[in-house]
């Protein structure tokens, strides 16, 4: 059985990042709507955006976002 990982988002934008572009990239990469992405960044708590995925899958998502 392969090891699985969780992909956790900490609700902070990198300095200099264009917020709209970052949000759009999350929407298209993870196939979620704008309200979902907004909810991730409107909290002070980290959010698990993928859970129990194989490490190779998580790496692909990290590369894409």
Image (cartoon, grey):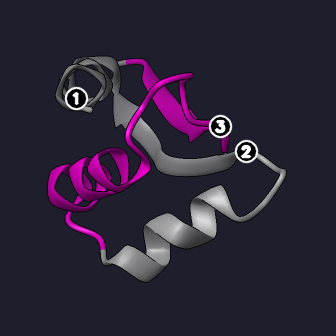
Disc 2 target residue: 46
Residue 63, magenta (yes or no): no
Quadrant occupied by the C terminus: top left
Between circles 2 and 1, the one closer to the viewer is 2
Q: Circle 3 is placed at which residue position?
A: 12
Label 3 – label 1 distance at C-alpha: 23 Å
**Residue range (magenta):** 3-32
Q: Nearer the viewer, residue 40 or 7?
A: 40
Counting other residues with Cα less than 10 Å from the Cα at mark 3, is it few (<14), some (14-19), or many (20 or more)? few
Place of residue 14 in the rendered image (x, y in percent of width and height, measured from the top left): 54, 24
Quadrant, the N terminus: top left
**Quick one: label 3 or label 1, which is nearer the N terminus?**
3
Side of 49 relative to 33 (left or right): right
As drawn, the label of residue 57 is 1
Seen in the picture, residue 19 relative to 53 is either above or below; the reply is: below
Residue 45 is situated, as x and y percent measured from the top left of the image, at: 82, 50
Task: Specify the label residue 1 is tagged with.
Answer: none
Nearer to us of marks 3 and 1 is 3
Q: Position of residue 48 (x, y in %)?
A: 59, 48
Crowd band around label 2 with a 10 angstrom C-alpha radius: few (<14), some (14–19), many (20+): few
User: Would you place residue 18 above or below residue 65 in this image?
Assistant: below
Mark 3 or mark 2, whichever is nearer to me: 3
Q: Residue at x 77, y 61 (%)?
A: 43
Are discs 3 and 2 less than 8 Å apart at CB? no
**For the residue labelled by badge 2, is the local secondary structure a helix, a strand or a loop?**
loop
Closer to the N terminus: mark 2 or mark 1?
2
Which secondary structure lies at badge 3? loop
């Amino acid at each position: 059985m392969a090891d699985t990982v969780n992909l956790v988002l900490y609700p902070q934008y990198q300095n200099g990042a264009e917020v709209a572009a970052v949000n759009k990239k999350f929407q298209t990469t993870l196939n979620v709507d704008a309200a979902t992405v907004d909810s991730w960044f409107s909290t002070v708590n980290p959010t698990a955006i993928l859970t129990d995925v194989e490490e190779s899958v998580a790496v692909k998502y990290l590369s894409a976002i």
